[in-house]
Amino acid sequence: MAKRKIIVAITGASGSIYAKLLLDKLAQLSDQIENVGVVMSKNAKDVWLWELDNKDYEKYDFDFYEKSNFMAPFASGSAKYDTMIIIPCSMGTLGRIANGFSDDLITRSADVILKERRKLILVARDTPLNLIHINNMKAITEAGGIVCPAVPSYYSKPKTIEELASTVVDRVIDLAGIEQQSYRWSE
């Protein structure tokens, strides 16, 4: 099996725990992954510090890129990154992608992934939704992206916040096509 090249974008939406758990899981699954490129907005760093009381994003052995760096390899389809996960995905970011605004590295990379017909997964983290949000989600879906709201499941009877948030991250890993051991219904 070919190793994966993955872009992880972290926006300023609430839900930094999802991004942290995804980065943890990708580090554990490194035998299946060639490269992980990470883009964090300034708001994402602020929210991470507020919600998780740390700057642990600095400890990951991934390639980090500034949101303004259009020289990042995945700003072009020729770099052949096969999957992009935006986690958590703010409604502002989702809206810009849905409407074709490539004004930073996150939205440009999403545009590249969609135009190359590769896998784009947006972990939307907002509630309630208005009609604009729903129409933007529809546009993303029609363009080939996957909107995976950060809605945890309870089948596995999670006991901690991390276990609960992991139900979303495990679903995202599955959607990305990466093999993992996780809870499976009726198994």
Image: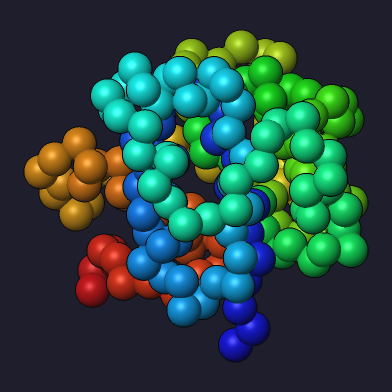
Above or below: residue 95 compared with residue 57:
above
Q: Where is residue 79 in the image (x, y as percent from the top left)?
A: 82, 63
- Number of callouts: 0
| Residue appearing at x 26%, y 64% in the figure | 183
Quadrant where the C terminus sits is: bottom left
Q: In the displayed structure, does residue 125 sit left or right of residue 98?
A: left
Whether residue 169 is visible:
no
Whether residue 40 is visible:
yes
View extreme (left): residue: 159
| Residue appearing at x 45%, y 18% in the figure | 46
| Residue appearing at x 64%, y 83% in the figure | 2
Judging depth in this view, the residue of 10 and 127 nearest the camera is 10
Q: Where is residue 76 in the image (x, y as percent from the top left)?
A: 88, 53
Judging depth in this view, the residue of 92 and 133 nearest the camera is 92
Judging depth in this view, the residue of 149 and 31 nearest the camera is 31
| Residue appearing at x 14%, y 40% in the figure | 160
Colouring method of the image: rainbow
Q: In the displayed structure, does residue 116 sit left or right of residue 23?
A: right
Q: Where is residue 41 in the image (x, y as percent from the top left)?
A: 60, 26
Quadrant where the N terminus sits is: bottom right
Q: In the displayed structure, does residue 20 sit left or right of residue 72?
A: left
